[in-house]
Amino acid sequence: MDAYFDNSASTKVSEKAIDIMLKTMREDYANSSAKHIKGVDAEKYVKDAAETIAKTLKVKKSEIIFTSGGTESNNMALLGTAMAKKRLGKHIIISGIEHPAVYMPATFLAEEGFELTVLPVDKTGRVDLEVLKESIREDTILVSIMYVNNEIGAVEPVDEISKIIKSKNANTLFHVDAIQAYTKLRINPKTQGIDMLSASGHKFHGPKGVGFLYIDGNVKINPIIFGGGHQRGMRSGTLNTTGIAGMGVAAKEAYDEFDDRIEKIKSLKNFIMDELEKIDGAVLNTGRGDNFAPQIISVSFEDIRAEVLLHALEDRGIYVSSGSACSSNHPGISGTLKAVGIREDLLDATIRISLSELNNMDEAKYLIDNLKELLPLLRKFVRK
Amino acid sequence: MKYKSFLIKYGEIGVKGKNRYMFEDALMKQIRIALKEVEGKFFVSKELGRIYVDTDGDYDYEDTIDRLSKVFGIVGICPMVRIESKDYENLKKSVVEYVDEVYPDKNFTFKVDTRRADKSFPGTSESINADLGEVILNAFPEIRVNVRKPDVLIKVEIRTFINIYSLEIAGPGGMPIGTNGKAMLLLSGGIDSPVAGYMIAKRGVRVEAVYFHAPPYTSERAKRKVIELAEIVARYSGPINLHIINFTDIQLAIYENCPHEELTIIMRRYMMKIAERIAVENGDQALITGESIGQVASQTIQSLLTTDAAATLPVFRPLIGFDKQEIVEISEKIGTYETSIQPYEDCCTIFVAKHPVTKPALEGIERSEKSLKGKIEELLERALETKERILVKAK
């Protein structure tokens, strides 16, 4: 049996998305900016996708900018805001558990003369709202906080954060990295006070290499990629009609089937968490309820090296990740796990099980059975 | 102007007496193999004790030089301009053109050295040297002659065609692959073992390799990294038969039954035993390791003695007297370094003790191994039966 539990790293592309992408390559392959009819045909895919995505967020389609993915969306939000607002102020706030696609551009800005405040988080990964309140100043131009943490699944109190920001400084922009949240939560930027929001296609059964950044119509930031003036000059470069069309279809499917999918994922999560709690030496870093996303389970196993467990599971056709797939490329230990203060000896003993609605109960049971079998074997052989 | 031929200079194989033709043929064969992948038509021939590579039509010059400079046995590669006409005036004109193009900066001293293999060509070597020297001096007043220590030695060879050359690109030296038998390299993902394989291959030895894989403790990526290293070594050694052994159960048996501080040394001994079994099956005459005295606990002189005793074939350790930095330099030169330093755990480090033995006594180790009796034999057989074999080609 193959059981793919690494859906927060990437997902299987939906058949409908594949179909429309093939069509953009086989038939409607023209440049969507071309003036002839074939260009118009190609542009329709982009318009449809923008409309679909705008509907899922209850925003205008002109507020959606297509990018090459989550990393570019986050870079654009941070660097574009910094460039546009540097005369108003040079203070930026992020949380201590942001993805590198946020903290790296933030660090770059700090090196370029901006001032960076990094908010602490509590044991469940939620940012300290008191510290946030104290940190916002007259020259704070941007607060960037993720919606769902990619390693432990913590859901940040986005509504409260935006209220605090706006009450302290109406000019401060609020960017939300929603790469693990989009299609897993219902998001309404207008009512939640979100000025910018990043998402990535391949996290919800769309293709890789495409994402979007929502920018509120009243917000002006600068582009970071210059060229032929595509997307009203905000993001130049021939539009990736193939990727955009695929992402649009995947987003529509996700929100059309939202309740069924989330219910299924939640029941799988609950089952797996119940079973993990029964395993000796298993420490859950993820909780239940609304403070945690439905699709992510972070669990540490005492005296087990995560990478060894990962390969042992792989041998049984079960795929998980150690830390997050992004950070496991680096030998360094997960920033989030450290920030939430999990035990030192568990940092290197933590795996992430991430679900999608394509998983089923048989796979979940298969995972648990194999864990029960492998953990004692692996514990027998530890570095002395 | 375009180089049409290459004179291949070789070193040691020139002094091998009656065996000389055998070495030359082996070198020609290796040159042909190396040039197979290069765009263009090549003819490798032997004439009057020299090896020539002639080209016909368009070919990729850079790639040709790159491939030739990795063929063991070659000391130097001289790109030559070929003149088809044997008209003397035309030769003079061509020599002047050659100098003009190859040396844009004319501030140097030179000497012409003619080799008149075609004795029907008029004049003597000396008179041709003098004539050609004169036309060069007349054409470029800044150039000066120096017959004793010239900056540039312009060689003119008069055979079926006339060849002009003065450049020499260094080859790797050594002996042609296939002239010195076959050996089995214990290849890990580290810096040392690929260099050791390269060095033995350089002596004309055909190299096979064995890698010990320990899933789930080592990853599929670690295995791919080893294959990648073999691909780089194969650029020099030719295709490598890579044997992959699943070592996990043996390692765990040692872990369970033997003193922990002796784990690495006992493990090394079983690696030697397995490598030797595969080597003998494949007709290899020696084992190769990347060990260097004192580098780690398992490479002290006592440890080397203990691992050596596990094998009956000779164990070649070409890096034995090298410092780490010297090994790194070679690995950078041959191109394995970047791959070697990718951080994937190999099976030697996963269970390593905090304080492994550094001065094991053979009798003591053999005593410890007695506790494996009755279990290890079957595990060894299973490891050999489940062996995977990949033919790794240069990449």
Image: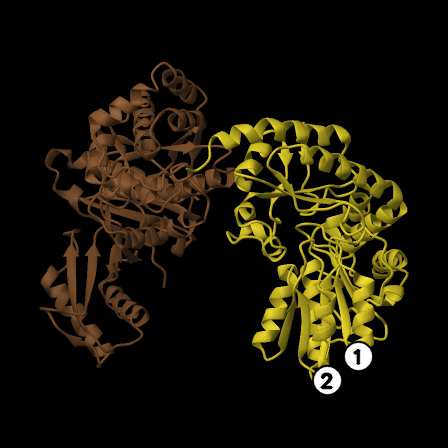
Chain colours: A yellow, B brown
Q: Position of residue A219 (x, y in %)?
A: 81, 75
Q: Is residue B159 left or right of residue A272?
A: left
The residue shown at (90%, 58%) is A55
The residue shown at (65%, 59%) is A97
Frontmost residue, A369 versus A16: A369
Asked if badge 1 and badge 2 are on a common chain, one would say yes
Q: Position of residue B295 (x, y in %)?
A: 26, 46
Q: Secondary structure at mark 1?
A: loop
Q: Quadrant of residue B181?
A: top left
Q: Is residue A308 left or right of residue B25?
A: right
Vertical arrangement, residue B321 with respect to residue B112, above or below = above
Decide: few, some or many residues near mark 2? Use Cα within 10 Å; few <14, some 14-19, many ≥20: some
Mark 1–mark 2 CB contact (< 8 Å): yes
Chain letter for the residue marked with disc 1 in the picture? A
Q: Position of residue A176 (x, y in %)?
A: 76, 63
Task: Name the residue carrying label 2.
Answer: A88
Q: Secondary structure at mark 2?
A: loop
Amino acid under disc 1: Asn
The residue shown at (15%, 55%) is B116
Task: Name the residue carrying label 1.
Answer: A171
Q: Is residue A225 visible?
A: no
Q: Which mark is residue B284?
A: none
Looking at the rendered image, the quarter that the C terminus of chain B falls into is top left
Q: CA distance from mark 1 to mark 2?
A: 9 Å
Amino acid under disc 2: Leu
Q: Quadrant of residue B365?
A: top left
Q: Position of residue B148 (x, y in %)?
A: 9, 68
Decide: few, some or many residues near mark 1? Use Cα within 10 Å; few <14, some 14-19, many ≥20: some
Q: Is residue A120 left or right of residue B156?
A: right
Vertical arrangement, residue A363 with respect to residue B73, above or below = above
Vertical arrangement, residue A146 with respect to residue B370, above or below = below
Chain-order first, disc 1 or disc 2 = 2
